[in-house]
Amino acid sequence: METIDKLEILADAAKYDASCASSGAPKRSSEGRDGIGATNGMGICHSYTPDGRCVSLLKILLTNFCAYDCQYCVNRRSSNVPRARFSVQEVVKLTVDFYLRNYIDGLFLSSGIIRSADYTMEQLVAVARELREVHQFRGYIHLKTIPDADAALIEAAGRYADRLSVNIELPTQNSIEQLAPEKSVHTIKLAMGNIRLKLDEKEAEPKAPVFAPAGQSTQMIVGADASDDQRILSTAETLYGSYKLKRVYYSAFSPIPQSPKSVPLAPPPLLREHRLYQADFLLRGYGFQVKELLPASGNLALDIDPKLAWALANREHFPMDLNRAELAMIARVPGIGLRNAKRIVELRRMRQVRYADLSRLRCSMKKIAPFIITADYSPARDTTPSETLRRAMADAPEQMPLWPELQAA
Amino acid sequence: MLLLVRSFDEWRAAARQLIVRRAPPESVQWTGQEEGGDLLSGAMPELPPQASQQPDVAPRVPRQLMEMLQSAACYRDPGRWAFLYRVLWRWHHGEQEILSMADEDGGRLQHMVKAVHHEVHDMHAYLRFRERPESAGAPRYVAWFEPAHDVLHEVALHFAKRMGRNSWLIATPEASVLWDGSTLHSTGPLMRSAADIDDPGEAMWLTYYRSIFNPARLNADIMHSHIRSRFWKNLPEAAVVPQMVSQAAAGARKVGQLDTVGKRKGATIPIAPEDAQPERQQPSTLDECRRCDLWQNATQAVGGQGARRAKVMLVGEQPGDQEDLAGKPFVGPAGELLDRAMDQAGMDRRKVYITNAVKHFKWEPRGKRRLHKTPGQREVMACHYWLETELEAIGPDVLVALGSTALKSIMQSGSVALKDHFGKPFQHEGRWVVATYHPSYALRVPSSEARAEALAAIVEALRTAKRLSEGGPPEDPMAA
Ligand code: SF4
């Protein structure tokens, strides 16, 4: 089979993994040196496909032959998909060629499980090693880690890769047992814990060899099982706290060809996925806790964003005086983002904040008005019922900017 | 006065002198083009010193503002030099508001900076090199781009880092840069449109682009909102987008798979489910414990460790953050302190058995960290089963209860208080029990004096335990 045919099959097989960020690597440069590649820590999206998702890395599987039978996965052994397998050399050449034409920032390599976890992991490491050592490639490398693989292989992977990830895929032990019989939450957690220990060691000992400087991440599939958003976010919160993950990616389950009966046939729940990303951002960036966003089991509201939902459910904090409130609280006002909260505090040092300042800062005035007090403005206190506000501020259903800040970590 | 400037450096030199001479913004006209007439290029004419006014001091500009001015200078707008001078003038006269977006000039400045950064970013992202055949010689890679602002030089530095010793050329309608593998050369325009080079690498890219697209998630508006329309005409993938969109819209949305992949011959993998099971160490029954809910948020159960027939067993509270990851008891900071205490008490860690009352880490999220939470009596009782198993297997003569949770577990009672038993050995179910602080208490108390006291108390308890295990008396005969 020609490389181009394999590329068609093995990119198609890799598209269900939501992660694509290329940020967080240390600064590297090839100026005047052998080899190629640079990173500046930020990562770049080099294109967008018509599903609105960015192309930042060459995202492919080494092979889509797989011994496992995970029901949500198009590559499961019982699936009747065309199969292909790249050689190490082919992946290396594709990466270098794409990189030189400025299509990508690096490689994100994953694989079906062939022969054994160790054998599969060895192959993934071999690609990264060849890129780094033979081609002196200084671009971004993200390796998907096989949880059952030997700790020594994970350590080797961390020497070459900027980021490692272990996918949890489903938020509960029960779902994993049912839909992914060969996987085990236990080994997945152990693998994540192992990576975190190595990251901690490196942090404590700066002279130790490099280990996955862009950290680790994971992915959860949304809508393949019956878990609600509270379950999903609680699992994310647990994983963030336990393993210092850089990111949890949420991937709306896409129906797959010859779908098994155990998974839904419905179109992907994109809006739900979007709300989860917004909630996740509030957890990581704004200091919210899951129990604040979702005090009981259930799903995030679809018609309004989670920050607005929180504000409407907690009216006692509002209206908030922007000339007095603390930065962290200002950032909790609907329509004011982290950056604008900082700008407001900066401006406050020079003079009083006025209503017109906020529109110049491009805050969302439609959202902000009932929640704030400025030097020259104070809304009628608590007279509008939350339900009315909610109706006035609900997003039009077709507005759905996916991947709002995918590059942010 | 009419001044001609062609670069940021020229502007800066001129602006500096103007400030020193107290020339207000209204008194200067700036131009970036030679339009004939009486032009003063960069250098300042000798103005007769004004007797009434002392020259002003040179402006002191913070780095943040200088960088903003430099970026804004790349913004293609005939009024840019005059505007930048007004900003500098206002800053110099104490108007710090110029840094805020809420100020009118400040807002415009930030808008210009943002537009220039945006353009730099887009050029980093959407510039495409085509590869020329090796036989054609240098440059091996050629790109054409139409930037809206004067960002070519900055962008060239980015590609010099990225491409190593490979030679390349970036052409724009206004100017070009050439990298020969070690040096950058700037020239005037060299091309009039996208390079007409047949690069087979482009076919690979289009295949990748088509395959990585998920038709089930079709959302072309988002794509267009990210890539501004003027860039599309030079992107190779633009040619295949309309077909991708219309195919996805016409029914192919049902699944994520690319239709050409679906048409290929498929194959299942003939492996029996038993053979697919990975070879894994069987989780111990402790790992599978579901007697309470603590297993859910922990990584693993942490059982005891130590000598198989140890005479002394140390019982702590529960694994912490580090123990949870490592799967071993007392490896974190509290473990280090315990090691020190054992050292001072003359106790050999290899000869004792160390475990915890509760085997899974109980915690709650605090920002991005895990905050230890004391296990409740229900969890302590549920987990007592495992302590019992360990007591049976090891058969120690002496138990050291490190902290009140350990004591409650050993006594199987939620009402025992550490202070009632502290440092006074007693017998329980045929064994000696010595109760003292948990090592993390000795880490936590604020004053260094209290810390030293706590450590001393732990050392003392360990000494007592050692003595009891050797058949000695409960009280230290030397103490009196
Ligand atoms: S803490 Fe103890 S009782 Fe609770 S699940 Fe873990 S091992 Fe079982």
Image: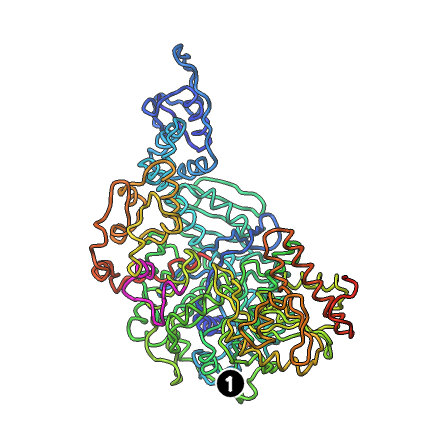
* Left/right of residue A252 with respect to residue B135 in the rendered view: left
Residue sitting farthest toward the top:
B51
Q: Chain of mark 1?
A: B
Near-viewer residue (A365 or B333): B333
Question: Which residue is rendered at x = 65% and y = 75% of the image?
Answer: B304
Near-viewer residue (A174 or B246): A174
Q: Position of residue A395 (x, y in %)?
A: 26, 61
* Left/right of residue A83 with respect to residue B244 in the rendered view: right
Whether residue A116 is visible:
yes
Say above or below: B264 vs B169: below
Residue B426 part of the magenta segment: no
Near-viewer residue (B183 or A170): A170
Whether residue A89 is visible:
no
Q: Which residues are magenta?
A: A290-311
Q: Secondary structure at mark 1?
A: loop
Say above or below: A65 vs B103: below
Colour scheme in the image? Answer: rainbow
Q: Quadrant of residue B256?
A: bottom left
Quadrant of ligand 1: it is bottom right
- The total number of labels drawn is 1
Near-viewer residue (B279 or B182): B279
Question: Which residue is rendered at x = 36% and y = 67% of the image?
Answer: A295
Residue hosting label 1: B269
Q: Position of residue B158 (x, y in %)?
A: 50, 48
**Kind of residue at disc 1:** Ile
Q: Position of residue A398 (x, y in %)?
A: 26, 64
Ligand 1 is within 8 Å of the C-beta of the residue at disc 1: no
Q: Position of residue A116 (x, y in %)?
A: 59, 79
Q: Quadrant of residue A264?
A: bottom left
Residue A293 part of the magenta segment: yes
